[in-house]
Image (cartoon, rainbow, N blue to C red):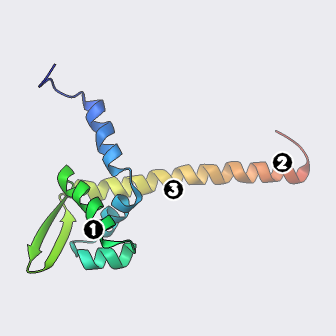
């Protein structure tokens, strides 16, 4: 039915899909430290300008970043502090997940060297 509201879980899934590109994540990480001109983003990410432009457009359309132009310089910044907090939360979650994987790897390696399977 047209105009019916999107369920929150679906909106969240679409939001995370929008984040689901390494270049977009890297841009958000770089912008955590404050606004950056496109030339600085290009130097840090080292991809073709057209590829970066495409990813910046996705972030801008979603409203997660904003841009301002001064002369020929375009500067991007996070639209709000919650995005930086989301990036920090993702880092904390990944740290815990990877620590757990390292523990499992260590157990597997110990089992392999001792010749016992658990």
| Tag 3 and tag 2, C-beta contact below 8 Å | no
Q: Can the viewer see residue 32 in this picture? A: no
Q: In this view, which residue lies farthest toward the left?
A: 71
- How far, Cα to Cα, is label 1 from label 3? 21 Å
* Disc 2, SS: helix
- How far, Cα to Cα, is label 1 from label 2? 44 Å
Q: In this view, which residue lies farthest toward the right?
A: 115
Q: Can the viewer see residue 106 in this picture? A: yes
Report the disc number at residue 31: 1
Residue 42 appears at what percent x and percent y? 32, 75
Residue 92 appears at what percent x and percent y? 44, 55
Taking the spot 28% from the left edge, 71% from the top edge, the residue there is 33
Residue 14 appears at what percent x and percent y? 30, 39
Q: Quadrant of the C terminus?
A: top right
Mark 3 and mark 2 lie on one chain; the one further toward the N terminus is 3
Taking the spot 26% from the left edge, 65% from the top edge, the residue there is 53
- For disc 3, the marked residue is 95
Report the disc number at residue 111: 2
């Amino acid at each position: 039915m047209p105009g019916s509201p999107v369920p929150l879980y679906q909106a969240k899934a679409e939001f995370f899909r929008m984040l689901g590109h390494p270049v977009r994540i890297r841009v958000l990480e770089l912008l955590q430290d404050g606004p950056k001109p496109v030339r600085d983003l290009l130097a840090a990410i080292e991809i073709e300008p057209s590829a970066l432009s495409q990813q910046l457009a996705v972030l801008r359309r979603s409203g997660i970043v904003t841009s301002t132009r001064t002369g020929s310089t375009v500067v991007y910044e996070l639209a709000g502090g919650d995005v930086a907090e989301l990036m920090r939360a993702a880092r904390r979650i990944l740290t815990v997940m990877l620590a757990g994987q390292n523990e499992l790897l260590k157990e597997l390696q110990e089992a392999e060297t001792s010749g016992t399977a658990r």
